[in-house]
Amino acid sequence: MYSRTKMQQPSLFKHIRDIIALPFTVTVIVPYFIHNPEKRFFTTNDILIQSIGVLLASAGVSLFLYTVYLFKTFGSGTLAPWTATKKLVIRGPYKYCRNPMITGVLFILMGETLFLQSRNILIWTITFFFINTIYFILKEEPDLEKRFGEPYKKYKAKVPRWIPSINPYDDVNTGS
């Protein structure tokens, strides 16, 4: 009889802890402290700009939650490097872009920037993007190559870091 052992999943507490420690801090706590209503793009509340901000933030939250779900169910890990996934996740948006979770966070920040018309949050969004780009190049991508080897190298060679590809990554050898 064939028996499959299921990988140990991180607890719900660990997922919540990691969400609060990283994306919640980036999208809620930091913007709360840096937003200055006096430093706005416009002098009036433009409902169109604010509506676009709400749409961007909503899309970002949806993308972020979907990627967290993929990490939990298919990767057997959380979004944090200290509880990293045990399996390479190449499903859903990961077939088009290597970092859709961060893209979701960037959409949230851009949405906040537009909704609040905040120069400071715009500067934070740009800073966050560059910090992550440097982190991915110097730390995360080399670590993923060590953990997942050749499947990750093939994936990395074919899937862009930030701007989604039109065609999904499809490698029958990944099991994704």
Image (spheres, helix red, strand yellow):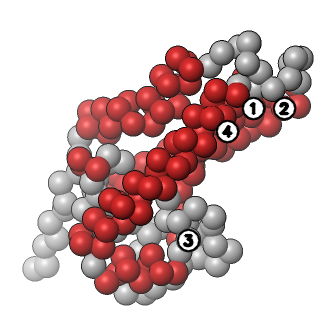
In this picture, residue 50 sits left or right of residue 26: right
- Image coordinates of residue 6 in percent, x first then y, are 19, 62
**Residue located at (67% from left, 38% from top):** 110
Residue at disc 2, secondary structure? helix
Residue 140 seen in render = yes
> Which label's residue is closer to the chain start, 2 or 4?
2
Residue at disc 1, secondary structure? helix
The reply to whether callout 4 and callout 1 are in contact (CB within 8 Å) is yes
The reply to whether callout 2 and callout 4 are in contact (CB within 8 Å) is no
Residue 62 seen in render = no
Q: Nearer the viewer, residue 57 or 130?
A: 130
The reply to whether callout 2 and callout 1 are in contact (CB within 8 Å) is yes
Q: Which amino acid does label 3 sit on?
A: Pro
Report which quarter residue 70 is drawn in: bottom left
- Image coordinates of residue 149 in percent, x first then y, are 27, 79
- The tag on residue 110 is 4
> Which label's residue is closer to the chain start, 2 or 1?
2
Q: Mark 1 points at which residue?
A: 114
Q: Mark 3 points at which residue?
A: 160
> Which label's residue is closer to the chain start, 3 or 2?
2
| In the depicted structure, whether residue 65 falls above or below residue 46 | below
Q: Mark 2 points at which residue?
A: 49
**Residue located at (24% from left, 70% from top):** 147
